[in-house]
Amino acid sequence: MARVEGGSYLPMFGERGKPRTVAPFLLDRRPATNAEFLEFVRENPKWRRSQASRLFVSEGYLSHWAGDLALGPGAPGDAPVVQVSWFAARAYLKACGKRLPTEDEWEFAARADATRVDATMDPAFLNRILGWYGKPNPPVLPAVTTAETDLRGITGMHGLVWEWVSDFNNQMVTGAARNDSSLDRSLFCAGGALSATDAVNYAAFMRLAFRSSLGGNFTVANLGFRGARDLTVPSPARP
């Protein structure tokens, strides 16, 4: 895992002009792979494709695999695992002693490129992300190691798969669920864009819109996940 130093950033929605603070945390250097998730379902039969409850996974759960315990040509072992629900991702990470990153943590980390902690003011950086969003998914996803790596050594935040976050539906649902704790009706329908803090960062708006369309049991052909962990800061030694 890579350490992400904390700081503040301006989210797409929230109290206008008011940054939010993200504490330091650890983030997986790459998304979880098919091979890793296969080991998880071997040890946890209730999460195998044929046995997982439809309350927690949709019909598409691991549908690109050849079988319950077989990856097949459509799911290379080193490619990111997709077609997994939020519930399944959370169960996998709990077994690893990890958790899903929060939306703030993911968005904060995803601002980086190979040389800068925050590249979001660079139109070329944003256009490169939008260019990937505009491409159709390849029939078989590439290895996680083929994606771009940022200056922290974190690979594939962009250009590989979309990723689950723990609070994927807290935006654009109700003001009571957001940090601004107000019911801002301008977030809904066409008025949503009026509340954006950075109308130029259309890539971030697309991510928030995509997440807001999800349900916890949804499975999508290009939606994977990676783990996060709280950063335990050792207490100063007592004199």
Image: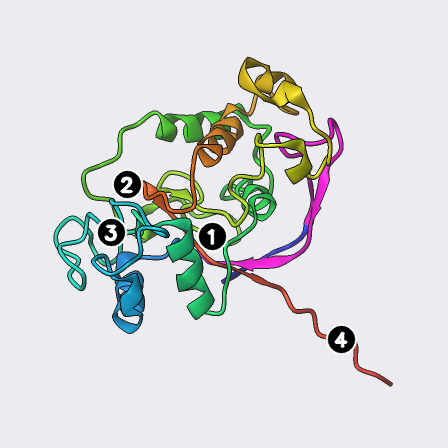
Q: Main secondary structure of the magenta part?
A: loop
Q: Residue 19: within the magenta?
A: yes
Label for residue 235?
4
Element class at badge 4? loop
Please name the residue that numbered disc 1 is placed on: 154
Amino acid on which disc 4 is placed: Ser
Element class at badge 1? loop
Instruction: Estimate the spatial distance between the alpha carbons at disc 2 and disc 1, rounded to whole Å.
Output: 22 Å
Q: Nearer the N terminus, badge 3 or badge 1?
A: 3
Label for residue 57?
none
Residue 52 drawn at (x, y percent): 29, 58
Please name the residue that numbered disc 3 is placed on: 62
Left or right relative to 175: residue 167: left
Q: Give 57 or 129, whichever is nearer the viewer.
A: 57
Mark 3 and mark 2 in contact? Answer it, CB < 8 Å.
no
Amino acid on which disc 2 is placed: Ala
Q: Nearer the N terminus, badge 2 or badge 4?
A: 2
Please name the residue that numbered disc 2 is placed on: 221
User: Crowding at label 2, few (<14), some or many (≥20) Cα neighbours within 10 Å?
Assistant: many
Magenta segment: 7-29
Q: Between tags 3 and 1, which lies in front?
A: 3
Q: Residue 216: within the magenta?
A: no
Element class at badge 2? loop
Residue 212 drawn at (x, y percent): 49, 33
Mark 3 and mark 1 in contact? Answer it, CB < 8 Å.
no
